Image (spheres, rainbow, N blue to C red):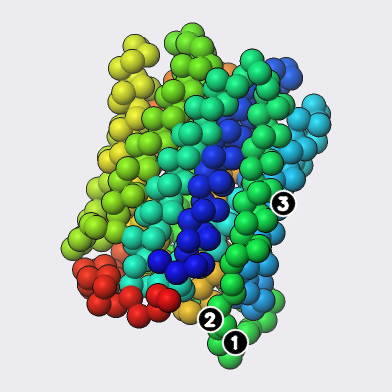
Amino acid sequence: MNRNVKTVLAVSILFGAATGIYEFVLPYYLKERGFPYESMGRIFTVAAAGMLALRIIMGRLADTRGRKLFYGLSLGSSALAMWLTPSSISLLGQSLLKTIREAAFVTRETLHPVVLYEESRGRFMAFMGRTRGLEYLFQGVGTLACGYLFLLLGTGGNLRLAGAMLALAFLFFWLLFRERQRDPDPHPGRLRDLFTFEMHPNLRVIALSSFVFNVGLTISHSFIMPLFFSDKFGVSESTVAWVMVWHRLTIAFPLLIAGSLRIRNLKAVYIATLALEGLVLSASALIPNFYGASAVWLLHDLIGAGIWIPVQNMIIQEYTRPAHRALELGKIQAFGGVGTIFGPFIAGYLSARVNVSAPFFASGLLMVGAAAILALLRVAEAEAVVATPAALVDMEET
């Protein structure tokens, strides 16, 4: 593991802890300030809509001007948005700050796998799993910590703690990460080319599947996620914090061992685990008991995203063109990200007009639909890469 990978690994730990605090506390902060479900849905919807084009533009800029500047910028601006969140109690202010934070978040989401792939293609699955696994593990640590710091710091203090942790991550990254020299793009193209879908057919399939998946994901994994357990079962915030901790652990464990998996059929594993994730989510909405619903719900990442996330990323990195890697990944994420506009709005509507369980049930059904779209994938070449022992192809580690 070279210096850059170690730096990204350390940043992932701090980023995870800060995210665990922010995502758990924000819905309670908004509820504390008197925002109803539908207003929360609007805040998350505006944020999702505000950063779609940014994924593409930032991806292209990172291809032409380097990874470090924009990865670092994503950490710094996210830290600032988190720190300022307790300073506003208006719908407009919260929507703006949430948009800045989400824009920073998706910029890092685009560049994180690109950096790891370029640092060590042969060990990409291992490094992707390890960094993401530790990130989710420390999201659990952050969630658990703020669950017990509610009385001491309050919601506002916890949000500022998250901002301070990300500021530290920014400094750490900026001082230690060293930009790799890359060949310039011989065909930079025109501005309008940024918004075309001229890419490998597999990438277009994943983009379409991601759109449907993200509608489903953000119906359940938005402001409603902790409130589902609090409002449906009447449990305390500290009890919900424990559920959120286990939510992070159940995705962290499979990710941490991703590098040791020898997956022979990427397509089959991708489809099966995504479909299982959806079925489990829908089933959890139908269980009337807190412990039963929580136990079933916690399986969704353990048998789902914890396995298919590195598989999906491997396929994407293999089929993107080197000179356009961040741009093409940004396009996939932008198109898929359109789904995040609808999810929170639907969650607010279903919670207010049906019941608090309805978002979880609808979420799972859409994930199953996203899995069905993946039947169009053709990934024979990618399978051969994953099956190759990392030690034989890792030629770039320093």
Q: Residues within 10 Å of mark 3 (few under 14, many from 20)?
A: many
Measuring 66% from the left and 54% from the top, which residue is drawn there? 170
Mark in the foreground, 1 or 3: 3
Determine which residue is flagged by label 2: 323
Real-space Cα distance between discs 1 and 2?
7 Å
Real-space Cα distance between discs 3 and 2?
26 Å
Q: Residue furthest top?
A: 234
| Picture coordinates of residue 21, whole percent (x, y) | 58, 33
Marks 3 & 2, CB-CB < 8 Å contact:
no
| Picture coordinates of residue 398, whole percent (x, y) | 43, 76
Determine which residue is flagged by label 3: 77
Residue 378 figure quarter: bottom left
Determine which residue is flagged by label 1: 184
Measuring 52% from the left and 59% from the top, which residue is drawn there? 8
Give amino acid for label 2. Ala
SS type, badge 3: helix
| Picture coordinates of residue 339, whole percent (x, y) | 53, 47
Any part of residue 52 in sight = no
